[in-house]
Image (tube, grey):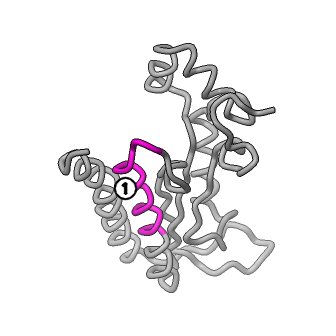
Amino acid sequence: MSLADWRSLNGIHNIGCFLLTRAALRVMDRQDPVGSIRTVDDRPPSRGAIVILTSLASEGTFLGVGNYIAAKHAVKEMVQTAAIENAARGIRVNAVAPSYVSGPMMDQFLEASPEVKNALLGDLPMGRLVNPGEVADAVAFLASPASSYLNGHTLVVDGGASLPLSNTPFGQRS
């Protein structure tokens, strides 16, 4: 792998995430804390919640894509550090890590090889890709008052693919 390839993904995923998070924090720091719309409990006011999209790659290791894995692990650690550094100011920072998301890019990849498609889907416990709406629901949850005590967490949205017993070589589940 070339240094340019390594730097490219680091710039996109790690540095890009840092710059966006820093910009959001600057805005949130200037706003007044807002109380929860829930009247049943006594949740403290909040200045906001940042939700970073990362990848299942932030949770493990995959061969041949070390630059992507390293960048996603760095994003996860940045989320955790930002969560600690901003909690006292009423700002939560979390991440959503989906596995393979259904859409044009994955469709094109899977259509190129029926064998790869069957192997990939056979390795997913739910037998399908996550759809974008399911990822959006996870983001909405982490941004909402319903997750007011979650901070520094990465919510994995993978249909169970990362569970140790389901993580067998493609298509070899018994």
Which quarter of the figure has residue 38?
bottom right
Q: Nearer the viewer, residue 86 or 68?
A: 68
Q: Secondary structure at mark 1?
A: helix
Magenta part of the chain:
63-79
**Type of residue at label 1?**
Ala
Per the image, the residue denoted by label 1 is 71
Which quarter of the figure has residue 132?
top right
Reply above or below: 126 against 9: above
Q: Nearer the viewer, residue 13 or 147?
A: 13
Q: Give the tally of numbered discs.
A: 1
**Residue furthest bottom as drawn:** 88
**Is residue 155 toward the left or the right of residue 49 in the image?**
right
Quarter that holds the C terminus: top right
Q: Residue at x 60, y 28 (%)?
A: 120
Q: Nearer the viewer, residue 165 or 156?
A: 165
Residue 26 point in image, percent of width and height: 32, 72
Q: Would you say residue 65 sits in the magenta stretch?
A: yes
Q: Residue at x 26, y 45 (%)?
A: 1
Q: Nearer the viewer, residue 46 or 155?
A: 155
Residue 92 point in image, percent of width and height: 53, 71
Which quarter of the figure has residue 152?
bottom right
Residue 69 point in image, percent of width and height: 42, 52
Reply above or below: 42 against 140: below
Q: Residues within 10 Å of mark 1 (few under 14, many from 20)?
A: many
Q: Residue at x 40, y 42 (%)?
A: 64
**Residue furthest left as drawn:** 4
Reply above or below: 48 against 144: below
Examine the residues drawn in magenta and state their main secondary structure.
helix
